[in-house]
Image (cartoon, rainbow, N blue to C red):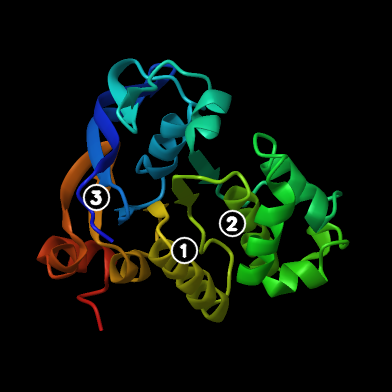
Amino acid sequence: MEKNKLILKVEKIDVSYGVVKALNDVSIEIMEGEIVCLIGPNNAGKSTLVETIIGINKVDSGEIYFMGQNITKKATEVRVASGICIIPERRSLMSMMTTLENLKLGAYYHTKEFKDNLEVVFEYFPILKKRKNQLAGTLSGGEQQMLAIARGLVSVPKMMMLDEPSLGLSPKIVSEVFEIIVNLNKKGLTILLSEQNARMALRISDRGYVIERGNILLSGLSEDLSNNKRVQHAYLGGGLE
């Protein structure tokens, strides 16, 4: 897929939690068809940035553009309807609802297409078809992450943002989840991946941004970041295998 059309532009945004500055003059760009990763330590601002793009946090200054439209002051539901979805940290499933009921929630703006989209999702995640009548809270950690991604897919997104998708999962399941992300991207889905597992994130992404203390410190091709001494020392234990 050609990756030359700008889908997301975050331009010099500042975000605060009360008197605490959470993001400072942050700018990122994502081209259609890319996987872009956002790496950094705990409390670096990764989740804050993702949540700001979807509209959970208000910006103090700066602007956000999606598909050429200024969405800086748009409500979260407008951003979701326009084609942005978020797979939040810790998944935020409705644990006392079934797999199928959770998927229906994700299709809120696309109820007419839900049946067809559901079949597509079940092709990606056949285990969820087997578990469709099972309570989400009783699924394994890996199955819950798959359900969270599937719930995002039935919203028919143009761009999916995943916030710490490897959190709490075993290495084997992490590999499976990252393989799912790659396959979704190959099908044409643009992805912003916020992830502490820098090694895996850089391995599957096209480009990356390094964020610390609410500031973008470095950006570039993922391969270049992987070979950057500063990144290797801070996040990769001396370098990629």
What residue does disc 1 label?
A: 184
Q: Amino acid at mark 1?
A: Leu
* Position above or below: 168 against 29: below
Q: Secondary structure at mark 2?
A: helix
What residue does disc 3 label?
A: 209
Quarter placement of the N terminus: bottom left
- Of mark 2 and mark 3, the one earlier in the sequence is 2
Work out whether residue 67 or residue 142 is closer to the camera in this orientation and state it: 67
What residue does disc 2 label?
A: 149
83 displayed left or right of 216: right
152 displayed left or right of 187: right
- Of mark 3 and mark 1, the one earlier in the sequence is 1
Q: Position of residue 194 (x, y in %)?
A: 40, 52
82 displayed left or right of 122: left
| Residue 226 at least partly seen | yes
Q: Report the Cα–Cα distance between label 3 and label 1.
A: 21 Å
